[in-house]
Amino acid sequence: MKLSTFKPQAAFVLAALAAASAQAAFNSGSTGADGALNPTVNTEIQLPESGILNYTTVNIPAGVTVKFKKNTANTPVFVLASGNVTIAGTIDIRGGDATATGTYGDGAQGDDAIPGAGGPGGYDGGRGGRDDLQQRVDIIRGGSGLGPGGGLGGLEGGDGCNAIGYYHYFGTGGGYATNAYQAGGAGYQCAASTITVFAKAYGSPLLQPLLGGSGGGGGRGGTAFPGAGGGGGGGAILIASSGVLQLTGSINARGGDGGGLAGAGAGGNGAGGSGGAIRLVGTTVSGNGSLLADGGCINNSNQPRQNCLATGYSGQFGGSAGRIRIEGEAITYSGSASPAFVADVPGPVFIAEAPSLRIASVAGTAVPANPTGNADVTLPATTTGPIDVVFQTVNVPVGNTVLLRVVPAYGQATEALSPAITGSSASGNASVSVTLPSGPSTLQATTTYTVVVAGTLDLSRFAHNEQVEKVEVTVSMVGEATARLLTASGKAYDVSYAALRAAGFRG
């Protein structure tokens, strides 16, 4: 879910193998309302507002590429088929690359500092900091990437083992399956306190919720040219077939590259966006194709995907890898996957009656139910000082708090914790007062609460047969809720929230 609110000086964007029974056949839940998908030429499909496409069969032949046009809520792609799915061609949901900056590439300066766009369900990169001869902090700081693991923007100052490590004028790659660390600090063996700058990991290997990749941070602005923008996060896709899902082609959900940069007085490079998410579910999943959800890198010497990885060593300006998951009653897939895929039996496609969280208003102005991310709320130019951000919750216990994260396009993110949610579990509300910075920003919110498991509910099969005492649930503005089981022995297990609902858990 995304929202943009603005006044003349500010814009704000709101940015969720066990053995199978041979007799059981997976049901994708497709209604078949969209008929058969059988493109013969390269095709871009407009996603409906739900993000769900209900096909009878899917056949993408070799040499054909299918892309998806985002809906207003930027949901992941959900492809459901009542019959077989055959992918011999390509499905492309990559994050976009940032544009070249300064004299790099074609030298055109009109698009300097522009970040890469996220793939469907993924998040945009951060803008490059603006150029300023005096190098004033409030002008030159790079923007943070969007998304739960958005990479941090580049900062002022020279290199060295200080509070932010080496190469801090570069952006930090987007996090997802792992943290993404700022380049240079680990490689120069700085003290531990100097290499803690990172973009956070998020989500679950279960891909419940299904979340796309986060954008890389933009680079610091220079004296003559802006910094380069960060790469967009890879998109997210679920393909579910009630029959055979065969992949001999490819599905590409890589993160986009940070922009190339050159010229006297140039700033810092933007970093790569994180890889996205691919979840394949079918009665049988087969084929020898390729699945790609690697993090983005940077464009260097006019070559894409250079200086990859995100572990904090010298020359690493990439985003974290995303996640790949294959679920089937029978899995015979023998193709490649980067990163490696996780295999399991089919789980629920969607979660029913799940908890949800949204921002209802900003500074007293109502937020549309389905924000478009483009000036949905206009604040008066006279708006100054702290303003109230109001949250609405559904199926979330009262008494919990909401964490608001404000990510400015230029500079570092800030967080604010609300007082306790009031009202009822069915319909709750909370608010927090914050001062919004000038310039474009993103607003993200999460709430985490713990439910004590009733004595009559046995969830031990999800926790290696250990007794489960509590379930920790995290709800964000995007995607579905995540769940973590806490056992009597102190262990923790990430489990699909949908699977817990199917087992009788309510909370």
Image: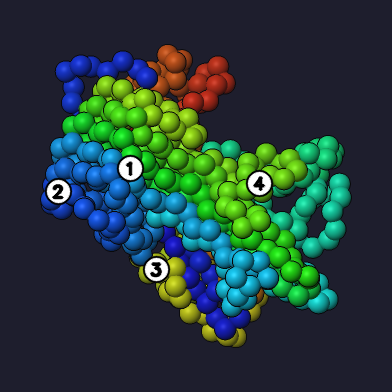
**As displayed, is residue 43 above or below residue 175?**
below
Residue 474 position within the rendered picture, expressed as x and y whole percent measured from the top left: 48, 42
Q: Quadrant of the C terminus?
A: top left
Residue placed most toward the observer, 59 or 388: 59
Amino acid type indicated by mark 1:
Leu
**Mark 4 vs mark 2, CA separation in Å:** 42 Å
Q: Amino acid at mark 3?
A: Thr
Spatial distance from mark 2 to mark 1, Cα to Cα? 17 Å
Q: Secondary structure at mark 1?
A: strand
Left or right, 30 with reference to 234: left
User: Which residue has dot 3 on it?
Assistant: 372
Q: Are marks 1 and 3 in contact (CB under 8 Å)?
A: no
Secondary structure beneath label 4: loop
Q: In the figure, residue 193 lies in which quadrant?
A: top right
Q: Nearer the viewer, mark 3 or mark 2?
A: 2
Pointer 1 residue: 238
